[in-house]
Image (tube, rainbow, N blue to C red):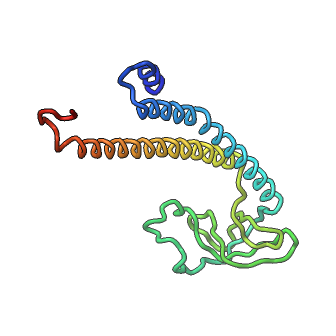
């Protein structure tokens, strides 16, 4: 709105400078880009991310399978394990030795993270594996994929708006610097004769 008012105010003003009108048009163009182009870019990126993530969800559901594992014993803590004082989000998980049967029927044995606070030998828990029985992460769910897509769209729109506004500010800054340079040059020419009788005659 300020850009529109500026254009209207400077339209027929006799004191209007070319740079004043340019700045007003620049502000109006930036406003339109932020209100129109940035949301469209966000929708486009969000839609593409949604398609890609939902395809990944389908692929992971096809290639990852939940199997029941049996606790054999506790695994020794390794340097790769999180510090128990800082990893509060994983307090309910324990690193154990376990065995399970892969989807292809082969027997597997190894370390796994069990959602058991006090695992004991013979306890059962669920792990996700690929076709060969190798432990993999839990597959991405539809809701999480949609949330990531929405965040990607919002992030893109915000980034576009920031780039447009940053570019506008940079251009205006350059215009102001050039205007000051012109004033300095004009003053350097008029300064020595300022106030003298007959100046300009």
Total of numbered circles in the picture? 0
Observer-nearest of 86 and 193: 193
| Residue 97 position within the rendered picture, expressed as x and y whole percent measured from the top left | 66, 77
Left or right, 111 with reference to 76: right
| Residue 6 position within the rendered picture, expressed as x and y whole percent measured from the top left | 43, 24
Observer-nearest of 50 and 177: 177
Left or right, 169 with reference to 198: right
Q: Residue furthest front?
A: 201
| Residue 186 position within the rendered picture, expressed as x and y whole percent measured from the top left | 28, 42
Left or right, 5 with reference to 70: left
Left or right, 27 with reference to 48: left
Q: Is residue 137 above or below residue 26?
A: below
Q: Quadrant of residue 14?
A: top left
Q: Quadrant of residue 187?
A: top left
Observer-nearest of 98 and 151: 151
Residue at image location 79% in from the left, 57% down from the top:
61
| Residue 124 position within the rendered picture, expressed as x and y whole percent measured from the top left | 70, 66
Q: Quadrant of the C terminus?
A: top left
Q: Residue furthest right?
A: 104
Q: Is residue 97 above or below residue 160?
A: below
Residue at image location 37% in from the left, 45% down from the top:
178
Q: Quadrant of residue 190?
A: top left
Observer-nearest of 76 and 175: 175
Residue at image location 46% in from the left, 27% down from the top:
3
Q: Is residue 97 above or below residue 25?
A: below
């Amino acid at each position: 709105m300020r850009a529109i008012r500026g254009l209207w105010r400077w339209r027929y003003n006799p004191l209007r400078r070319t740079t004043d009108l340019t700045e007003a048009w620049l502000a109006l163009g930036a406003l339109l880009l932020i209100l129109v182009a940035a949301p469209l870019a966000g929708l486009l990126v969000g839609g593409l991310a949604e398609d890609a993530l939902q395809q990944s969800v389908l692929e992971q559901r096809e290639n990852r399978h939940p199997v029941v594992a049996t606790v054999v014993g506790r695994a020794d803590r390794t340097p790769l394990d999180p510090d128990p004082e800082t990893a509060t989000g994983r307090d309910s998980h324990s690193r154990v030795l376990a065995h399970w049967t892969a989807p292809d029927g082969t027997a597997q044995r190894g370390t796994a993270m069990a959602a058991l606070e006090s695992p004991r030998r013979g306890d059962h828990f669920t792990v996700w594996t690929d076709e060969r029985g190798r432990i993999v992460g839990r597959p991405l769910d539809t809701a999480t994929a949609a949330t990531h897509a929405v965040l990607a769209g919002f992030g893109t729109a915000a980034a576009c708006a920031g780039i447009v506004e940053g570019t506008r500010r940079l251009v205006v800054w350059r215009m102001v610097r050039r205007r000051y340079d012109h004033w300095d040059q004009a003053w350097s020419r008029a300064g020595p004769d300022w106030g003298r009788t007959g100046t300009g005659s």
